[in-house]
Every structure is written in structure tokens, then in C-alpha cells.
Image (cartoon, rainbow, N blue to C red):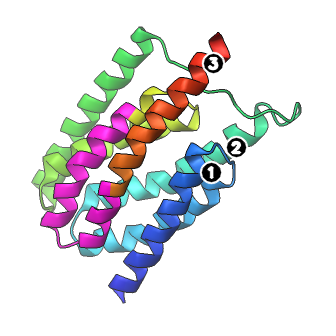
Amino acid sequence: MYLVLEIIAVLLSLAFLILLIKEVKWCWPFGIVSSALSIALFIEARLYSEAFLYLFYVIIGFYGWWVWTSNNAQKGEPLPVKRFSLGRAILLFGLGTVGAYALGATFERYTDAANPFLDATSTSFSFIASFLEAHKAISAWLYWIVINAISIWLYLDRGLPIYSALMVVYLLVSVYGWFDWKNKWTKAIA
């Protein structure tokens, strides 16, 4: 049962990622459903931070859908790709670091979590990357490159080879996404 659920969630996640890079607002419902399915899988694998993260993905999915459809919907234009300031980038990185430590310490102390600090680091910085993604900030892709690389090992370690393979694909697609959005941003400011 879990294998079928894992396969369906992975396929929906791939659809989300492809539509995200193409800047299609309908990416968000695919992300919402795939994230909802993933929550049960991560609880079973004792990756509680990941389960919490995927709950966040459901919520940020609705937020991203709202942001992508409301800001320029009246004009019929997509939300533009943007860069965040250095100060904002430092603040977000700091929040990710504090969140990783707090979440890791909590799950290490109060649960039987496997790899609580690595799991928490991936989770905390995924919150940041998802927020950046919802606002179409180029730097989201840099976070995803690192997060996906960490997640490959994390998922393999917990017996989730299909999710691990998905992270390999995500890693490669994240590199492509970074170059694609960077080129769009460069053309927009030229």
C-alpha cells in the first residue's frame, strides 16, 4: 500500500515541479495533493520533521496558488521572477538555521526520530525555499539544490528509494530551474 502511495505522490510531485518551472499556476494543486499523500509515508518512516514539512507544503501550496493568481491576475500577467535583497537573504538564512536547531533538538529529545538534526535542517530550509518559491525568487532554487542533495541520502537511509530517486530528479531540475529563472530575471531587467 505504501509503495503505491509513494509512487502516486512522486508522480504528482514531478508534475508540480515541471509546471512550477514553466510558471503555470496549476502547479500548486499538484503540489498540494502530493504533499498531503506524503505526510503518512513520512510518519511511517519516522521522519517527523519531513511529515511536518509536508503539512507545511500543503499550506504553502494554497498560499503560492493565491500569490500566483492574485497579484497580476487582473492584468493577465504572471508574477515576475525576482531577486531578494542581501539583507533579506541573510535574515531568511538565519531563520532557517535557528529553525533547524530548534526543530532538531525538539525531535531528538521528545521522539524516536531518525536523524533528527539532518531531517530538521532539510525541513527548516525547505520552509524558507518554499516561501521564496511562492514569491518567485531566484534564490529558492539554490536552497533546493542543497536540500535535494541532503534528502537523497536521508530518504535512502530510511528505506524510501523512490523518494530518493525523486530527489535526484529534483536536484537536476533545480539546477535547470535556477538557470531558467535567472535568465528570465536577467531579460526582465535588461
Q: Position of residue 19 (x, y in %)?
A: 60, 52
Q: Main secondary structure of the magenta part?
A: helix
- Residue 187's mark? 3
- Is the residue marked by circle 1 packed among few (<14), some (14-19), or many (20+) residues within 10 Å? some
Query: Which mark is in front, 3 or 1?
Result: 3
Range of magenta residues: 142-168
- Give the quarter of the image for residue 2: bottom left
Badge 2: few (under 14), some or many (20 or more) residues near its Cα, within 10 Å?
A: some
Q: Secondary structure at mark 3?
A: helix
Which element type, helix, strand or loop, lies under badge 1? Answer: helix
Q: Amino acid at mark 3?
A: Lys
Which corner quadrant holds the N terminus? bottom left
Asked whether the residues under the numbered discs 1 and 2 touch, taking CB atoms below 8 Å apart as contact, a structural biologist would say: yes
Please say whether residue 185 is one of the residues in the magenta stretch: no
Q: Label 3: few (<14), some or many (≥20) within 10 Å? A: few
Query: Image check: 52 left or right of 122?
Result: right
**Where residue 17 sits: x, y (%)?**
51, 53
Q: Which residue is mark 2?
A: 66
- Is residue 137 among the parts visible in the rendering? no
Q: Nearer the viewer, mark 2 or mark 3?
A: 3
Give the mark nearest the N terminus, 3 or 1: 1
